[in-house]
Image: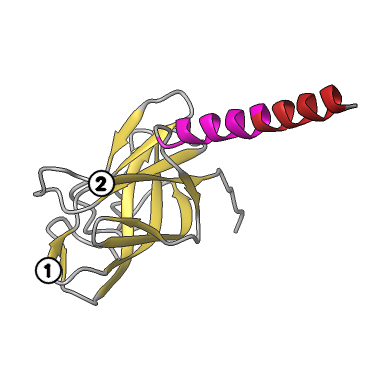
Amino acid sequence: MRKLGWFGVTLALGGFLGGCSSQGNSRHDPKVYHMGEPVRTGPLVYTVLDTEWLDQIGDPLAPRLPRNHFLSVRISVTNAGSATSGVPLLTIVNSHGVAFAEIDDAKDLPEWLGYIRSVRSAETLHGRLLFDAPTGDYSLQVADDADRESQSTATIRMPLELTHP
């Protein structure tokens, strides 16, 4: 009976330590957030509010057309730090690891966040980002101020959602 007790304690302890070691490995795997969740990277807190796929932007008589499709991402960025912080251009990554950079000239997009953007302490920016990419599921790679040497990043999943007018 006593041997069975020690065996049970040893088994339980092994399971506990095994659980701890796998949890330790998760530190190396970046956490993936979902749309609607606030995500902090350094002083910046990003929230993806919604996404929309567009065939064109701008004037209907002289539209701007994408190479693939336009993905418009409505986002808010709050500065939780004590100093003004730059908001870098962002990137989306598909399920195959292919990255697409944010379009730096999307003036025809309503509520475009802009190219050069900064946010003061305790201020929140609201607006849209624009990407040109094939239709699909993407993850938005968000980062803190690009000027910092030790940049902090996170990933926000944006599943494909097609809507019909």
Q: Amino acid at mark 2?
A: Ser
| Element class at badge 2 | loop
Q: From the viewer's perspective, tell me whether residue 31 is left or right of residue 41.
A: right
Place of residue 159 in the rendered image (x, y in percent of width and height, measured from the top left): 55, 44
> Which part of the image, by quadrant, shows the C terminus?
bottom right
Please state which of residues 129 and 85 is positioned toward the viewer in this rendering.
85
> Which part of the image, by quadrant, shows the N terminus?
top right
Residue indicated by mark 2: 152
Q: From the viewer's perspective, tell me whether residue 19 is left or right of residue 95.
A: right
Task: Tally the marks.
Answer: 2
Task: Name the quadrant containing residue 19.
Answer: top right
Place of residue 6 in the rendered image (x, y in percent of width and height, measured from the top left): 77, 27
Whether residue 110 is visible, yes or no, is no
Whether residue 1 is visible, yes or no, is yes
Q: From the viewer's perspective, tell me whether residue 10 is left or right of residue 109.
A: right
Place of residue 23 in the rendered image (x, y in percent of width and height, measured from the top left): 52, 36
Q: From the viewer's perspective, tell me whether residue 41 is left or right of residue 52.
A: left
Compared to 28, does 39 lie above or below? below
Q: Nearer the viewer, mark 2 or mark 1?
A: 2
Compared to 55, does 39 lie above or below? below
Residue at screen point 18% across, 74% down:
121
* Circles 2, 1 touching at the beta carbon (< 8 Å): no
Please state which of residues 29 and 119 is positioned toward the viewer in this rendering.
29
| Element class at badge 1 | loop
Place of residue 108 in the rendered image (x, y in percent of width and height, measured from the top left): 26, 58
Q: Amino acid at mark 1?
A: Thr
Residue indicated by mark 1: 84
Residue 164 among those drawn in magenta: no
Residue 17 among those drawn in magenta: yes
Q: Which residues are magenta?
A: 14-27
Crowding at label 1, few (<14), some or many (≥20) Cα neighbours within 10 Å? some
Assign the magenta stretch its main secondary structure. Answer: helix
